Structure formats: structure tokens, C-alpha cells
């Protein structure tokens, strides 16, 4: 059975307690590792980037893959790899929650540009303000505890 789909997800997740534990010196190795996880899930990576306390992923989602399983696979495998690699000695894990926003394919190039420029973007807007803005744009009711508490 074949399926035609175009499901474009902007996925964002943060480090545990939003600590700045993603060493930017070795981040390209992390992104390559995550790209492998994405390919193993039959999905296409369009862009990945982030800063010390969170990452953004723009990818499609294969119809055979459930979103929650997809994000869990990325977070669990990358967390294990980060701890074992020695590149991220302060990394304690990913935060419990994640954000997954859908967009039309026509918005892909703008999203790629947005994710590509995270370092510059966060000189102007904090991660917390970014999430609040994105939630507002998407009509998502905001609950401070939902995204910021790691229980």
C-alpha cells in the first residue's frame, strides 16, 4: 500500500531544566546522529539547529510512524549517545515535553531559514518567549508548568 502525504513538522525540545548543556563545539556530530535516527524512521530531515538549551527539527513524518514514537526515538537515542560520546559532559537529558507544530509545504523555506538562524534569533528573543510566541501563533493554550517543569 502506498500513501501520498506531506506532513511537515517543526519539532522543538529542550534540555532537562532548560540547562545550557549542548556544547556547540560538537553539535554537528549530534545533528548527524539525529539525522540517522530520522532516516531510520523513513522520514526526511529538512533542517536541524538549536542553541545550548534546545533544538529545532524540521522534518516530514512517514505515515507508518506515530509522532510520539518518532520524537521518543529521537530523544531517547540521542540522549544515550550524548551521554556516552563524552562531547556533552554536562548533559543530563532532554526535558519531558516537546512541541510539534504542523506547517504547509509552502512554508518550508521560511522555516528552514528560521531554524538555520537560531543563534542570531536567540540574541533577540529568549527560548521561553519564542515558545510563547509560537504557541500563540498556533492557537495553543499556554501552561507554564507544562513546558518548563521536569518531573
Image (cartoon, rainbow, N blue to C red):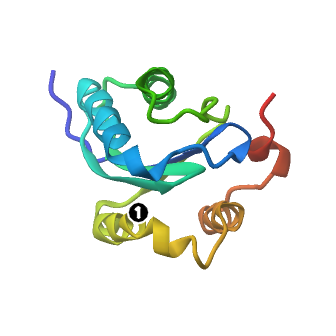
Q: How many marks?
A: 1
Q: Quadrant of the C terminus?
A: top right
Report the residue at 44% width, 35% height from top.
87
Pointer 1 local density, CA inside 10 Å: few below 14, some 14–19, many at least 20? many
Residue 84 placed where, x, y %?
Answer: 45, 20
Report the residue at 37% width, 38% height from top.
30
Residue 109 placed where, x, y %?
Answer: 28, 69
Residue 118 placed where, x, y %?
Answer: 46, 66
Residue 70 placed where, x, y %?
Answer: 42, 28
Please name whichever residue, 49 or 147, is drawn nearer the observer in this view of the structure: 49
Horizontal side of residue 122 vs 133, given as left or right: left
Report the residue at 65% width, 61% height from top.
127
Which residue is label 1 attached to? 115
Above or below: residue 70 compared with residue 142: above
Can you see residue 122? yes
Horizontal side of residue 122 vs 65, given as left or right: right
The quadrant where residue 39 appears: top left
Please name whichever residue, 90 or 28, is drawn nearer the observer in this view of the structure: 90
Disc 1 secondary structure class: helix
In this view, which residue lies farthest toward the left? 2
Above or below: residue 31 compared with residue 144: above
Please name whichever residue, 49 or 21, is drawn nearer the observer in this view of the structure: 21
Report the residue at 63% width, 74% height from top.
125
Q: Quadrant of the N terminus?
A: top left
Above or below: residue 104 compared with residue 97: below
In this view, which residue lies farthest toward the bottom? 124
Can you see residue 8? no
The quadrant where residue 122 appears: bottom right
Amino acid at each position: 500500500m502506498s500513501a501520498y502525504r506531506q506532513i511537515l513538522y517543526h519539532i522543538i525540545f529542550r534540555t532537562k531544566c532548560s540547562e545550557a548543556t549542548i556544547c556547540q563545539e560538537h553539535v554537528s556530530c549530534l545533528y548527524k546522529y539525529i539525522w540517522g535516527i530520522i532516516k531510520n524512521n523513513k522520514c526526511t530531515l529538512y533542517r536541524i539547529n538549536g542553541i545550548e538549551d534546545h533544538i529545532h527539527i524540521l522534518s516530514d513524518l512517514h505515515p507508518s510512524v506515530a509522532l510520539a514514537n518518532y520524537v521518543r526515538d529521537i530523544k531517547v537515542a540521542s540522549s544515550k549517545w550524548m551521554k556516552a560520546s563524552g562531547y556533552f559532559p554536562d548533559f543530563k537529558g532532554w526535558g519531558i515535553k516537546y512541541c510539534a507544530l504542523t506547517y504547509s509545504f509552502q512554508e518550508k523555506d521560511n522555516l528552514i531559514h528560521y531554524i538555520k538562524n537560531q543563534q542570531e534569533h536567540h540574541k533577540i528573543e529568549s527560548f521561553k518567549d519564542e515558545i510563547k510566541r509560537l504557541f500563540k501563533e498556533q492557537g495553543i493554550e499556554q501552561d507554564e508548568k507544562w513546558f518548563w517543569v521536569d518531573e
